[in-house]
Amino acid sequence: MSNVTRTPFVRLAKRTDIDPRRAWIIRVASIVIALVLGCIPMLVTGTNPVEAYSVIVQGSLLRPVYFRQTVKIAIPLLACALAIAPCFKMRFWNIGAEGQITIGAMCATYFALYWADRVPHVMLLLIMFLAGVVGGGLWALIPAFFKAKWNTNETLFTLMMNYIAIGIVAWLQGGPWEGRQGSQIIPKFADAARLPNVLGVHIGWIFSLVLVVLMYFYMNKTKQGYEIAVIGDSTNTARYAGMNVGYIMMRTMAISGAISGFVGFMIVAGANYTLYSGVADGVGFTAISVAWLSQLNPFAMIVISMLLAVLDKGSTTLQSRLGVPASVSDIITGILLFTMLSCEFFINYRLIFRGRAQDKEDGK
Amino acid sequence: MLGITKSFGQVLANDHIDFSVRWGEILALLGENGSGKTTLMNMLSGIYQPDEGRILEDGQEIYIRSPKDAYEHGIGMIHQHYKLIEVFTAAQNMILGLDDVKMDMRQVDARVREICERYGFEIDPSMKVYDMSVSQKQTVEIVKVLFRGANILVLDEPTAVLTPQETVKLFKVLRNMKEDGKAIVIITHKLNEVMEVSDRVSVLRKGQYIGTVETSRTNPQALTDMMVGHAVSLNIDRPRYDNPQTRLVVEGLTCVDEEGITRLEDVSFTANTGEILGVAGISGSGQKELLEAMTGLYPVKAGSVRFLNDKGEEVELIGKTPMQIRRTGVGMAFVPEDRLGMGLVGSMGMTGNMMLRSWRNGRGALLKRKDPQALADRILEELEVVTPGTEYPVRRLSGGNVQKVLVGREIAIQPSVLLTAYAVRGLDINTSYTIYRLLTEQKMKGVAVVYVGEDLDVLLELADRILVLCGGRVSGIVDARTTTKEEIGLMMTHLGGKEVNG
């Protein structure tokens, strides 16, 4: 028998079972590995990694001012990851959160600009909130409708919708909503259209945390959450169970888009106080990483969004203090994504090396 | 191929099979579903490697570790599911994966044309695959392996997707290739095609090599006998139910799939209370479509499925969604063929899977977990499901336990009709008997059971009547107590079981 000697050096075998505790150890280890690998770009740029990491931590967490700024970065990431979670659970690859945020922000901005003097503060914010939610939801409904009706590719569709959304805002920015002629800038919101601060950060952080609980509840305890999970596993099973797959897809996307629209509202009313075409600033994409790294677990998203926010905020401090390019944090985030996604591979598969496999067979 | 053995887990797919094909002949590899035909050929084409045995070409031992090795030895396989890149042209698909990057597209086109002319193919090398019909795609696959210099061609059920006219065309080019000295193996279970095109026939049954005969010296009856073997006694208990009534009337059911191929044609039968109606047929004869059409999962072109309750009231099921059928109060349980892909949610535990039937129950938006949890516990205990717990993903359970969960849930809805597709496929003997027992219990409770099966021995002992499908049509309905395996075998391959040389 010739092919015994031809066994490849490493073979893969699907793990039938893994202790959940062990799975989490692998996940934590992958973060550590990422941080260690992150030393390489620092060493290349001539920085002491230990010092760099401590600056990142100091510059993002250890002073109240910094901490508040970090939280401010984390809020939209967290809320948007929550928006994406049900879609991904359903295996509907919505990468259009960026556009849904933009449209939500745009709809909220309309009322901030033109209704600010007509309605009282809380009322105005409520209207802006509703506008953002409805706008984002409807925007997300479009690709879902096409998917349900004609089975179009949702990945491309949602992605392209982003550019349309950004284009619309760019047009408003230079056209109808432009403040000073030729400035290409939409005027700052009146105070009535700004979200109040709680403990130094706009109130969006409270909403986002409430949303974490709500989303956990929705995905795990409700009939709709169950439908989403079944569709994510197999659309055939869903049909077998009598579910209307197309309708559920559209409903879930509308919810997802609505939350993204809410994120857009928070960004314009809580952080920027104005609208511009880059208002989403990549949040819709980074949130995909947050959702994925958290295994779609809403509570884990708090940790992951904070972790990415720490890297983001810390790196600006790193740049000003040690002169290390801020893009180092992007590199670390990239490595982090890479290790954490690949660790799922080691959770699902185990490697069998040639020698060991042989021993096993001999043992029989 | 000598002494080839291959097992998957505990299933022995090929048991010491000796197999040979000569240059310049068409050999038919015949066998029932699951008899190991495709497995054997996959080893020849490098997809699998044999656990034991040798492969010789012109007396020389060769090693085939990958499809690439197979090509180097001039062996090419045309799979049932075509492996083409849809957005490439025919010619681009030909050179896909070849190392010779310097190849000039014009040269490729010229060679493709030359091959086509030589054997009588009709194909435009610059046509994109997605613009092609199924038979054109198949032509591209065949030309592709010839382009790569294959002298031994293996075709896995090439006619399954073709119209009769296309089949005639295919056989013509196969004969041309044979004249050219190539060795051709076609995997099939259609006897008339075997008789028409092949020179010799090799028969496999349940992973065993049965024998090889010259086509000119045999007849369909003899081949059927080789294919199905003699009846084996299984001692399945088959009590009679006293007062059978008509429960389900199917009339003129016709289904056409997305590609316009008729899957079911004018199917009519009745299913009675207290009876197991066996459905026999070669795989792909419309069994799956039949059950799915009855449960509202497959589009129906014509016909009706009427449900009769105890009071004699009729309910038409065709045109209703699965949810609407459920709401009419027709207790229709369905154990589909694809257990994890249709009947269950693999990533969820037993409780989550129980909810597939009950998730809508109760008012409000919240999921009720209590009843499904209790049901899961009950099934776990009664059917002795081996699982670490009711929350453990069913995907990770063994096949038998997966099926227990599925059948247990379907029986728990106290159905009046129970449809099952390949309920014991891949299961060990004990679990299989558990399933037979459960189905018989249901029958004695007055349920109309429809059992789609592939093992004729089981069908003969378990069912009361057997409906035989052949190419999407009803070949006949026979009494399981008086019929023979041979009779059914012939009906499976010939409509009505009468014509000898279809």
Image: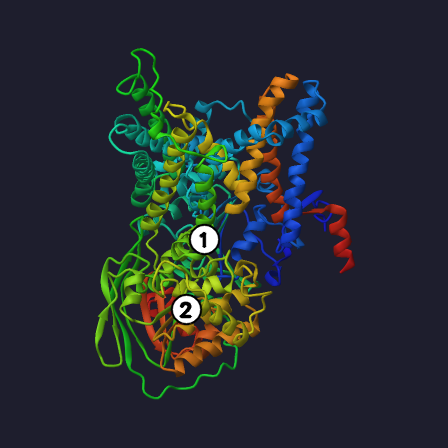
| Image location (x, y in percent) of residue B270 | 29, 74
In three-dimensional space, the C-alpha distance between marks 1 and 2, rounded to whole angstroms, equals 36 Å
Determine the chain carrying the residue at label 2.
Answer: B
**Residue farthest along the bottom direction in this orientation:** B242
Label 2 sits on residue: B420
Task: Report helix, strand or loop for mark 2.
Answer: strand
Q: Is residue A13 left or right of residue B420?
A: right
In this figure, what is the number of numbered marks? 2
Q: Which of marks 1 and 2 is in front?
A: 1
Task: Report helix, strand or loop for mark 1.
Answer: helix
Which quarter of the figure has residue B494? bottom left
Q: Is residue B302 left or right of residue B458?
A: left
Q: Residue at x 23, y 64 (%)?
A: B303
Q: In this view, does A237 lie above or below B67?
A: below
Q: In this view, does B187 lie to the left or right of B476?
A: right
Using a 10 Å C-alpha cutoff, classify the residue at mark 1 as few (fewer than 14 neighbours), some (14 to 19) or many (20 or more): some
Q: Which residue is drawn at 57% across and 65% down?
A: B389
Label 1 sits on residue: A217
| Badge 2 amino acid | Thr
Determine the chain carrying the residue at label 1.
Answer: A
Residue B494 shows in the view: yes
| Image location (x, y in percent) of residue A313 | 56, 27
| Badge 1 amino acid | Phe
Residue B63 shows in the view: no
Using a 10 Å C-alpha cutoff, classify the residue at mark 2 as few (fewer than 14 neighbours), some (14 to 19) or many (20 or more): many
| Image location (x, y in percent) of residue B406 | 46, 67
Q: Which residue occupies the foreground of this view, A138 or A240?
A: A138
Q: Which mark is residue A356?
A: none
Q: In this view, does A358 lie above or below A28?
A: below
Say which quadrant the C terminus of chain A sits in: bottom right
Q: Which residue occupies the foreground of this view, A345 or B85?
A: A345
**Residue farthest along the top direction in this orientation:** A182
